[in-house]
Amino acid sequence: MASRDPGHRVAESRIATMRRFNRFYTRQIGVLRKTFLNSPYSLAEARVLYEIARRRLPTASDVGRALDLDAGYLSRMLRNFEKNGLVERTASARDARRSYLALSARGKRAYAPLEARSHRDVADMLGKLDVADQARLIGAMTTIEALLGGEGKEKSAESSGYTLRAPVPGDFGWIVKRHAELYAKEYQWTAPFEGVCAQIVADYANNNDPKRERCWIAELDGENVGCIFLVKETASVARIRLLLVDPKARGLGLGARLTEESIRFARQAGYKKITLWTHSILTAARHIYQKAGFVLTRTEPHESWGRPVVSEFWDLEL
């Protein structure tokens, strides 16, 4: 809509171009279809399920703010989800008037195909483009979100300036190199640590199961700035490995986002638990894991990398 400020008049041709793009994109992603992704749910219902699935115990107010939904409309939708056994409420121990939302076991089963189909459809859309055009498209989307997002709204990964993607040739070498460089500089960990990283990356590169394992690369302004692996430990247990956020991307919530993506994928893949191995000195990573719901289960001192350190083992029940 054109601004009333005469200093910001908008050409009619630009208004027409934006409206044309809106029509194109709503058709492209199927917004106007009666149900979302051929599921029993509307787009609004699917978005609510998504917000509940991706957040740790949100309130109805949290979901409403995130989606800018009318409180009455959202309340009716949540009551229907509860009636159908998709969503469960848990009363706050501190405030009986406050309750937290979570998908039930049935809700998780209903949501998982939506997440998988949405992921597959976007992958298919991007897969028609070469890597350079993918970067151009994602960059354009990031710009649109940043310009139209407005002040005071919660930042997503993209509006924070970074994007998450699957690894491409050269990324695995970067993961090993950057881990070795940063840990040597920040913690004085020596060569055996680089070998550990190289072995983890080699095992994944040579033997990963794409249905149950995943690697994400975080990119900022065309440069790699982070990574994480989610790999199979057993049939029911997944393991997070090699979480890294480059100093130039710290403070953007990237570590938490990478961890959230791993947890979401683990649930989608059918794991019952995620485990991980970290160290007491890695305070930022420990904070991320703790905030995501991981519980410290065991500690163990060692001096494998030239410095005395304390290993920590953390688990998250899914």
Image (cartoon, rainbow, N blue to C red):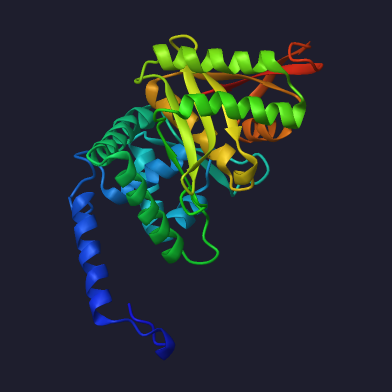
Q: Residue farthest to the right?
A: 308
Position of residue 283 relative to residue 27, above or below, is above
On the picture, is 54 further left or further right than 11?
right
Q: Considering only vertical position in the picture, is 186 above or below 16?
A: above
Residue 109 point in image, percent of width and height? 34, 27
- Comparing 281 with 196, the one in front is 196
Q: Indicate the position of residue 106 as horizontal and vertical percent values.
A: 36, 28
Q: Name the residue nearer the viewer: 175 or 276.
A: 175
Residue at x-position 39% and y-position 87%: 4
The residue closer to the viewer here, 276 or 40, is: 276
Can residue 123 be seen from the camera position used here?
yes
Residue at position x 48%, y 57% from top?
Answer: 65
For the point 43% across and 10% down, which residue is it?
235
- Compared across the picture, whether 146 is left or right of 38 comes to right
- What x and y, as percent, mark residue 39? 22, 38
| Front in this rendered view, residue 264 or 73 | 264
Where is the N terminus found, in terms of image quarters? bottom left
